[in-house]
Image (cartoon, grey):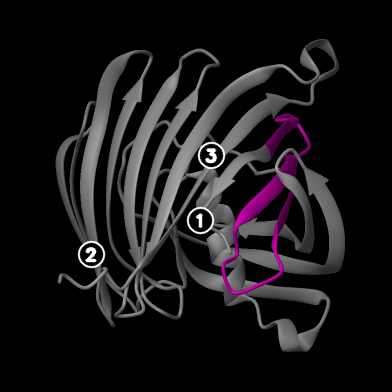
Amino acid sequence: MNKPPHHRTIRGTIRYTSDKPERLGQERGREYFMMTDQSDGNRIVHAHCEIDDAPDVIRDVVLALAPDGRPLDASVRLSVGGRFEGTAWMRFGEHSAECESYNQRDGRISQRLERDRPVGLGAHPICGDALFLRAYDLSKGPGKTFFPNVMLTSPDHRGATGPLLFPLGFGLEFVGREEIEVPVGRFNALHFRYVDTAGNMPEEHPVYDVWCTDDDNYIFLRGCVGGYMQTRYELVELRGLE
């Protein structure tokens, strides 16, 4: 008899809505994600992201994370305005990060950056915004930590350029533990804020509040961005979390 596979898979859907007064509650996109925890301790994340606002964005991401949450490798394919925009493969070693990509603006690009493996990779799926939160040491309690060694696949706030490797740093504030309700139910949650972005970003990112499950899974539950963006994200479907 064949033995069952030694892994667990969590699947979910995140709804993107607007918080702008003239569009309050209007759906503006969605994300379907799958996270597989393998027997070697690595987590493989698949995410399909759709942004309806013009020019519309479709992004497909596969991301491998080590047991400590640091990125191992990733692939990203991006369409903007109904047309192919770019594709990339990335790999992260202990002291280097490399990327092979092709995009409409720059053509073929090969990058190799000599630096320690980044604490996190922002490939722009919303589910990944919760997975990075494990980098914060909860034993310190509420407070703020700055992480200088992070990578993005695009400096655009919608992730609508590239993809390529873009280094930056930002602060992560742990607000505390809360109980919240989202469309899939009530959860004990960890509340964080992304703050103090440092890097050559084309535009400063507004403060970003994120809630995730208060367990080892760090499943995204809710996110709210203020400023000029005024957008909200909520978990509306979840399977496989026990």
Residue denoted by label 3 = 202
Element assignment for label 1: loop
Task: Say which residue label 1 marks.
Answer: 240
Identify the residue at horizontal 85%, vertical 17% (top origin): 21
User: Which residue has dot 2 on it?
Assistant: 91
Residue 199 rendering spot, x and y as whole percentages = 53, 56
Q: Residue at x 25, y 76 (%)?
A: 93
Q: Quadrant of the N terminus?
A: bottom left
Label whose residue precedes the other's in the sequence (3 or 1): 3
Q: Earlier in the sequence, mark 2 or mark 3?
A: 2
Task: Check if residue 211 falls in the magenta segment.
Answer: yes
Q: What residue type is disc 2 on? A: Arg
Image position of 222 (left or right of 176):
left
Q: Looking at numbered disc 3 in the image, what kind of residue is underneath it? A: Pro
Q: Residue 173: which quarter of the image?
A: bottom right
Label 3 element class: loop
Q: CA distance from mark 2 to mark 1?
A: 28 Å
Magenta region, residue range:
208-233
